Image: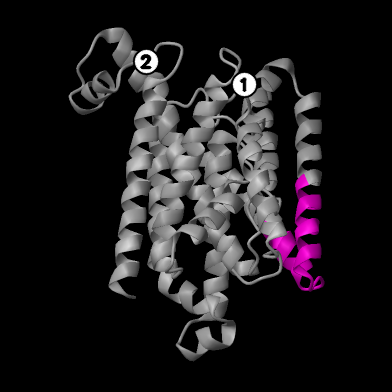
Amino acid sequence: MTSAEKRKITIVYCLLIVLMIFLFMLSISTGSVMVPFSRVASVLIKGTGDNDTVMIIKMIRLPRTVLALVSGGALALAGYLLQTFFRNPIAGPYVMGISSGARMMVAVMTIIVLSRGGGVSSIQMVVVSFAGALLSTVVILLLSTRIKSMSVLLVAGIMISYICTAVTDFIVNVAGDSSVVNMHGWSQGSFSGTSEQEAAFAAVFILIVSMIVWAVSKPIGAYRNGEVYAKSVGVNVRALQISIILLSSLLSGIVTAFAGPVSFVGIAVPFIVRKLMTDRRPVIMMPAVFLTGASYTMAADLAARMLLSPTELSLSTVTAFAGVPIVLIMLAGGRFERKC
C-alpha cells in the first residue's frame, strides 16, 4: 500500500467517525422537544441537566439511537459477509430472506407467549431470531446445491422472504388484539420504544460478534481469492464457510429481534464502502462497513421520525427509498454477476 493510499484511507475513516458522531448527537437532540448539542453532551458526559431533559435523553432517545447505531453496523457487516460467501454484491440479509425468517420465528414465539400472559426476555428473542435467520440461510444453501445461477438463487431468496412474510402476517392477523398491538410496529421495522436494557444488551452482543468477524478477516480475505487459494495458504474453507453463515445469521437475528426487519442496509452500505476504499481487504473494509452502516441507519431512523412528524414512518420504508436507487446503480453498472 502506497503512502497516498494510506492517507486516503485515513481520511475516509476520520470522515466516517466524524459523520457517525454528528448523526449520533443529532439523533439525540432532534425530536418534538429540541435539545441543543451542548446540553446533550452535558447529560451524556456529566449526567447533569434538568429532570425532563435527562429523562428524554437517557430513557427515550439514547437507547433508540444506540440501537440504531449498532443495528446499522450489524446489518452492513452481515451483508458484507453474505456477499463474500455468495460472491455477489446483491446478496443481503433482507433480500435473501434471512431477516424475514428471523421475523417469522420471533412473531410466532412472541404471540404464543403473549397469549399465555407471559413475557419474552432479550435472550429468548435473540435465540429464536437467530434460529429463524439460520433456518432461512440453510434453505438457501440447500437450494444453492441445485441452482448454479446466482441470479436465480437470489430470486429464490426473495421467494423465501415472501413466504416468511406471508406466514408472519397470517399469524399476526389471527392473534388477539393485544398481541397485534405489540407486534405491529416491530413487524414494520422500528427502533421506537427501545429500553435501556435492550439497547445495552444488543450493543454488547453485536460488538462482540463484530469483533469476532474482524478477527477472521484474514482468512476471509484469502477466501475472496478463491477456495483453491484459501486452501493453499492453510485456511480450513469448510469451517470458514460455516463461520460466515453463523456470524451473518447471528448479526441479522440480533437486529431483527429488537428492531424487526430492516431492508437494503446490507446491500447498499458495502457497495458504498467499496466505492470509498482503494484497499478492499476485509481487515480494512469491515470497520468502514460497520461505521457506514451505523451512520446510514441513524440517518434513516431520524428521517423516519421527522419527515412526517408527529406520524412516524416505518424504518424499512426510509431505507428502501435510499437503498433501491443504489441497487439499481449496481445493476446498471453490470456488477450483478461479478465477484465481490
- Residue 117, how many percent across, how many down? 62, 21
Q: Mark 2 points at which residue?
A: 56
Asked whether 140 or 11 is in front, the reply is 11
- Tell me if residue 253 is in the magenta stretch: no
Q: Is mark 2 on a helix, strand or loop?
A: helix
Q: Say which mark, if any, is on residue 117.
A: 1
**In this view of the protein, can residue 326 be seen by the observer?**
yes
Q: Say which mark, if any, is on residue 66.
A: none
Q: Give the range drawn in magenta.
A: 137-161
Asked whether 118 or 212 is in front, the reply is 212
- Who comes first in sequence, dot 1 or dot 2? 2
Left or right of 325 in this view: 171: right
- Residue 147, how many percent across, how many down? 81, 70
- Asked whether the residues under the numbered discs 1 and 2 touch, taking CB atoms below 8 Å apart as contact, a structural biologist would say no
The amino acid pointed to by label 1 is: Gly
Q: Residue at x 78, y 66 (%)?
A: 143
